[in-house]
Image (cartoon, rainbow, N blue to C red):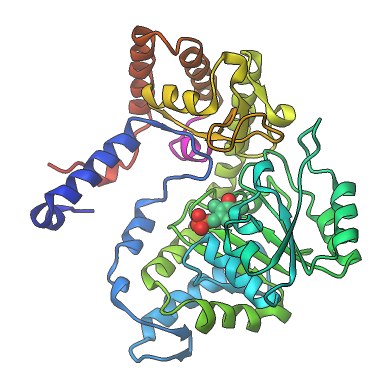
Amino acid sequence: MDYSALMKKDKYVANAISSELERQRFGLEMIPSENYCSVAVLEAMGSIFNSKYSEGYPGKRYYGGQEFTDLVETLATERAKKLFDVDHANVQPYSGSPANMAAYAALLKPGDKLMGMTLSHGGHLTHGHGINFSAQRYTAVHYGVNEKTHLIDYSEVENIAKKEKPKIIVAGATAYPREYDFKAFGEIAESVGAYLLADIAHISGLIIAGVHQSPSKQADVITSTTHKTLRGPRGGLILSKKEHAQAIDRAIFPMLQGGPHMNAIAAKAVCFKEALDQSFKDYGKQTVKNAKVLADRLMEQGLTLSTDGTDNHLILADVTPKGLTGGEAESVLDEVGITVNKNTIPFDKRKPFDPSGIRLGTPALTTRGMKEHEMEKIAEFIVNALDNHDNALIKARIHDEVKDLCAEFPLYAELGGFE
Ligand SMILES: *Cc1c(COP(=O)(O)O)cnc(C)c1O
């Protein structure tokens, strides 16, 4: 891409983008919800489809001039259905949260009961958290993880479902390092006559790669982001059984959204084409292999991990054994060029804004081409930085090593620089 027009027009924004590109190139991005999409996806996202209004769906629009919007939206929809082996796909959600809002709007009436994982155990805000629309518009009840194992206890989920009789059960989370048993969720939902919503925002790429089971047989509706492990543009996606297709489409438009972002839909089509390729399966497998090596090394060097490891792309580490809070660990790692986020550990004794843990993951590093060997090095950087959080000299040395490692795995070389 050529940023010459932007540099001429607005040097402040151009400089911010240029600096962010350098930050991404020379830092280790370990926030598990982040990834680097391809330049092809960026080109579609930044394309002239940005201008086009196309309220409605292919063949049924409220504006003229739709031959090419219909073409890309149909491509995106068909590819999504093939990728996830589902009857219906809606590629218009602006992001993951609006996708959940639409799924609820399609299946529930205001006041109906929704059961999701509690935020402090890894659930998402949209799964019924008090300050979110999902708890204000619906009646929210929660399940969590077991206090000893930090695993979802399916018999406990069943007990709560039997007692509460929710209209919908949400399976999915933002900070659960293990595989979800969608079959168990499906059986529980069926036994209480609830719909099952699988929110696969974090794990959609792993499902495509075959390293995580798919909910496509059990779930009535599946929602996802397209920018996390799926590695596409920032956006959302809803998949469903045929019987819910019309309700889902109407919930997105005209109920919740106006004109779809056709540039994002074109970029989703590109992302789904990439994800249909064998190389994406290899990517998903490597992402999980990398997370397992990282988890093992961190544990060997004194960190306590929730569930003692990981099955997926993310790790939840208690850093208090190193004499630090999650927030302090996040800052120390920032200083050495490693980006993670502070995170509550289930049954955390500390407060949500000042929790005991950090959440970290491998999707972005794996996209750069890093493998097990690099994960071993990175685990050492992390532990070394945490152990020497007061030592500026050691932190500076680790930061240099981080930059050297990043230089070995160039990022967005095609984009060049801003000179
Ligand atoms: C990220 C995420 C979302 C929300 O996605 P946004 O695009 O940030 O709105 C919803 N559910 C889960 C489980 C997520 O991890």
Q: What residue appears at the point 59 percent right and 72 percent down from the top-left corner?
A: 102
Q: Furthest-left residue in view? A: 8
- 251 drawn magenta: no
Q: What residue appears at the point 51 percent right and 77 percent down from the top-left corner?
A: 256
Give the percent coordinates (x, y) of residue 359.
56, 34
Ligand 1 quarter of the rendering = bottom right
Q: Which residues are magenta?
A: 361-370
Give the percent coordinates (x, y) of residue 206.
62, 48
Q: Is residue 143 left or right of residue 301?
A: right
How many marks do you count on the picture?
0
Q: Is residue 206 left or right of residue 8?
A: right
**138 vs 37: above or below:** below
Q: Is residue 55 left or right of residue 175?
A: left
* Residue 74 visible in the displayed image: yes
Asked which quadrant contains residue 106, the reply is bottom right
**226 vs 310: above or below:** below
Q: Work out whether residue 411 or residue 115 is closer to the camera in this orientation and state it.
A: 115
Q: What residue appears at the point 58 percent right and 79 percent down from the top-left corner?
A: 251
* Residue 277 visible in the displayed image: no
Give the percent coordinates (x, y) of residue 411.
34, 38
Asked which quadrant contains residue 158, the reply is bottom right
**415 vs 45: above or below:** above
- 368 drawn magenta: yes
Q: Quadrant of the C terminus?
A: top left
Q: What residue appears at the point 70 percent right and 75 percent down from the top-left corner?
A: 108
**220 vs 371: above or below:** below
Q: Work out whether residue 173 or residue 266 is closer to the camera in this orientation and state it.
A: 173
